[in-house]
Image (cartoon, grey):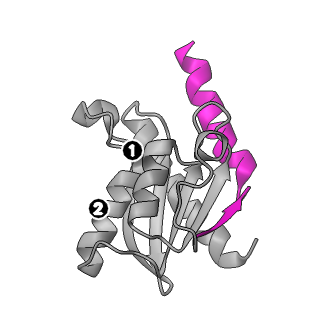
Amino acid sequence: MNKDDIRYMQLALDEARKALERNEVPVGCVITCQQQIVGRGHNLTETLQDVTAHAEMQAITAAAQTLGGKYLNECTLYVTVEPCIMCAGAIGWAQIGRVVFGTRDEKRGFLTFAPRALHPKCTVESGVLQEECARLMKDFFKQKR
């Protein structure tokens, strides 16, 4: 785990807290390219009444608009929770070069259901600020139950 990964995951956690403030599932995402943030997002599924409005989808759209193209192969996507199958598919189609996530999602994560969804050249790093990312999710769902 390097300093940049920690710094960008902290920014993804900031995005997750924005989701929490809106009573959304607290997942946040930041996309970088050459050490610059090119996209960011947080869950907006309740706000937009759109099941596809996950943090990763918001950030991918923003990054593509910032960079002026749909392929993000030189980008790194930082997300607080392991992407779901839908988001992993979008990450794969965007050809994102690297994915860094905080905590696993044993119930809906792509590694369980579609481990080959990402582009073949994509590398994956997990466990960055894992405890903080997991705590945010656990606390959110504890309040819902």
The amino acid sitting under disc 1 is His
Q: Is residue 16 visible?
A: yes
In the picture provided, is 134 more to the left or to the right than 25? right
Residue drawn at point x = 66 percent, y = 40 percent: 112
- Residue 141 falls within the magenta-colored stretch: yes
Q: In which quarter of the image is residue 31?
A: bottom left
- Give the quarter of the figure containing the N terminus: bottom right
Residue 119, position as x, y percentages in the image: 52, 66
Mark 1 nearby-residue class (10 Å; few <14, some 14–19, many ≥20): many
- Give the quarter of the figure containing the C terminus: top right
Residue drawn at point x = 58 percent, y = 45 percent: 114
Magenta stretch? 122-145
In the picture provided, is 10 more to the left or to the right than 130? left
Q: In which quarter of the image is residue 21?
A: top left
Residue drawn at point x = 48 percent, y = 87 percent: 34
Local SS, label 1:
loop
In the picture provided, is 43 more to the left or to the right than 81? left
Above or below residue 104? Residue 137 is: above
Q: Quadrant of residue 19?
A: top left
The kind of secondary structure the magenta stretch mainly shows is helix
Q: Name the residue under label 2.
A: 61
The amino acid sitting under disc 2 is Thr
Specify which label sits upstream in the sequence, 2 or 1: 1
- Residue 42 falls within the magenta-colored stretch: no
Residue drawn at point x = 61 percent, y = 70 percent: 7
Mark 2 → mark 1, Cα distance in angstroms: 11 Å
The one of 22 and 86 positioned closer to us in this rendering: 86
Residue 72, position as x, y percentages in the image: 40, 75
Which mark, by number, is residue 54? 1
Above or below residue 76? Residue 50 is: above
